[in-house]
Amino acid sequence: MDKLLLIDDEADVQYSFHRIFDSPEVELTTAASGEEGIERVQEIKPDLVIMDVRMSGMNGLETLRRIRQGDAKLPIIMMTAYGTTQTAIEAMKLGAYDYLLKPFDVPKLKQIVFTALKAARDMKQVVSYEPLLESEDYDSGVVGRSEAMQSVFKVIGQLSASDATALITGESGTGKELVARAIYQHSRRGERPFLTINCAALPENLLESELFGHEKGAFTGAATQRIGKFEQCSGGTIFLDEIGDMSPATQTKTLRVLQSGTFERVGGNQSIKVDVRIIAATNKPLEQAVAAKEFREDLFYRLNVVRIHLPPLRERVEDIRLLVNYFLKRFSQSQGQAPKSISTDAARALEQYHWPGNVRELENLIQRALVMAKGEAILPCDLPMAVFHGNPAAASATFEGKSTEVTPDLPASRDASSLARVLFQMARMDDRFKVIPAVERELIVQALAETNGNQVRAAKLLGITRATLRKRMEKFDIKKELSIK
């Protein structure tokens, strides 16, 4: 039985709550003041508190603050007949789970209450992580206990003791630059420069100039001489990301650097000598590019002295909870807050997701979840719907608070009709799940994420006006600062 505590000094409100929540599944206790409410919290240990803002004696915000000091995980819903934006902001800052205005809509009140009670149950199933990582592991940012990642760490250690060229392969988002930085930091060149160039981000002429520099007048707009990255990085390490997108001409000049350590600036004829270690990365199969004459074979062999392959996240599921723990700790430290936790069901949902964006996607998801989470733990309702897409059984277990391992009933399809089927199956499994509000809220969150929080562009993406978007953001309590890249 769920324990519900109402703190309100109005007898009519107490009477209404007794009628609304007259159920064997809910035990309702009332208190007529903030002081009495604090005593009741200590006595009955409620699962949820609903409290008025304006009361005689201690007001609701101060009561909220006092209760949160004693139990930071207890969900608290604030309500008032005198709603102001400032009051709502202050209540949410103090950790309120939600905010209601009187007179309230009974179905909406019930929905919020039962959702909060579900959140309270989930928070009691919080995963307690052991300190599995040493502090230096956190510093490097390369995290993993799986066999595949342990093999990667061994090669990093071996490479750090030499100047051998390395080629890092793996899907986008697997952490190739982090591995390159780890190699650099532990090498004898660790006190020298480390520069990164994304070969896919620059047009051919700009990439060549960026790497090798140019002389004054070498091309239109070259008003002065420019020193390239290879010169800037002499004695250090240069990381060439997405090298598979490098043009044939730039490939030729890069090969010469690897062979002799020399090159000429664009528009120049003076040979420049440098001592640079090259670490390259690609998410493309370079062997196929070589066979198709799109990538120089001799450059490939020069780069491929030592190969490090990073497995996709879906192939090292055992590392997901460790990575979640790492991101939670990192984000909390950067924000000067106490680390949050993640519920068992939310963690299980993450382990069942296919992660097309790999570790980068997980990092962004955790950052988003920390923004959305109203309590001290990340719950399934704080995760985006995409996590449950194609896995309605997992969604069912999540919404019912179960921890049963399940197999997806539907394939992971990306078309709208497949997603609709998943959503309706979730709705049939839990009558508290409302399809349209859930989808509408998620679309708004995603639109804001896609546009880095730009409401004008987000509204255009959604096909609504900015005014409508702002009303929906208020309706669904979506923070304006939400802009996950």
Image (cartoon, grey):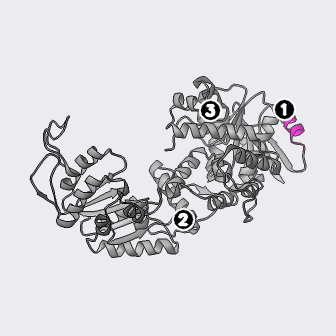
Magenta includes 429?
A: no
> Tag 1, which secondary structure?
helix
Q: Is residue 149 above or below residue 25?
A: below
Q: Seen in the image, is 206 located left or right of residue 434?
A: left
Q: Which mark is residue 158?
A: none
Q: Quadrant of the N terminus?
A: bottom right
In this view of the protein, which residue sits in the foreground, 209 or 297? 297
Segment colored magenta: 15-22
Q: Quadrant of residue 465?
A: top right
Q: Earlier in the sequence, mark 3 or mark 1?
A: 1
> Tag 2, which secondary structure?
helix
Q: Which residue is mark 3?
A: 473
x, y percentage for residue 77?
71, 40
Q: Earlier in the sequence, mark 2 or mark 3?
A: 2
Q: Which mark is residue 11?
A: 1
Disc 1 packing (10 Å; few <14; some 14–19; many ≥20): few
x, y percentage for residue 213?
19, 48
Q: Which residue is mark 2?
A: 322
Q: Seen in the image, is 459 located left or right of residue 3?
A: left
Magenta includes 17?
A: yes
> Tag 3, which secondary structure?
helix
* Image marks 2 and 1: residues in contact by CB distance under 8 Å: no
User: Could one spot residue 55 in this view of the protein?
Assistant: no
Q: Quadrant of residue 276?
A: bottom left
